[in-house]
Amino acid sequence: MAVLLDTNILLRLLQPHHPHSPFAERALNTLRKRDEVLNLTTQNLVEFWAAVTRPVDENGLGFTTEQAAAEVGTLTRLFVLLPELPVLQEWRRLVSAYRVSGKNTHDARLVAAMMVHGVSHLLTFNMKDFTRYTEIVVVDPKTLA
């Protein structure tokens, strides 16, 4: 099975004291032992960069751009980066069909990329943000740990 990693999984790997961190690590270890293909999209990397370079007092990690660049390099070596294929048509279909608005439009782009690439499963701590999409299987990392 192909699995897309939500950006929150990537962020928890950098936050060892966060309560979700051990669940993220164990879930990834479990999926690797099953020989699952772990995928990222360009959208993940954009969201990741935004979060890690945002100041700590604004709910970010306060990384420098050099630190962020190094982490993005590591992520692209550890996981499969899905090619940036045209996802606009699928994204437009999803946001219209599911009446998506506001911040959740970013999540819809992840799902659109999954649909274009034939990725069936999404690993995320934000289950509620993705349950509307009947086309995918949403997996809570806590169930794999």
Image (cartoon, grey):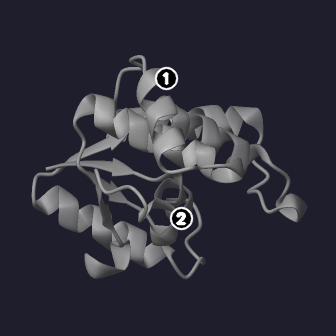
- Three-letter residue code for mark 1: Leu
Q: Eyeballing the image, is 14 above or below 79?
A: below
Tell me where residue 135 appears, x and y as whole percent: 28, 50
Residue shown at 31% from the left, 57% from the top: 134
Q: Is residue 101 above or below residue 137?
A: above
Outermost residue to the left: 34
Compute the Cα span from label 2 to label 1.
29 Å
Q: Which residue is mark 1?
A: 88
- In percent of width and height, residue 72 lies at 54, 36
Could you say whether the residue bearing mark 2 is in a helix, strand or loop? Answer: helix
Residue identified by numbered label 2: 12
Residue at position x 39%, y 34% from top?
113
Q: Position of residue 43 (x, y in %)?
A: 53, 35
The foreground one among 39 and 91 is 91
Q: Nearer the viewer, mark 2 or mark 1?
A: 1
Marker disc for residue 30: none
Residue 86 seen in the figure: yes
* Mark 1, secondary structure of its residue: helix
Identified by mark 2, the residue type is: Arg
137 sits to left or right of 43:
left
Decide if residue 38 is on the left or right side of residue 74. Answer: left
Q: Residue 7 location in percent, x, y? A: 52, 52
Viewer-nearest residue: 6 or 115: 115
Crowding near the residue tagged with mark 2, few <14, some 14–19, many ≥20 C-alpha atoms within 10 Å = some
Give the mark, 2 or 1, whose residue is nearer the N terminus: 2
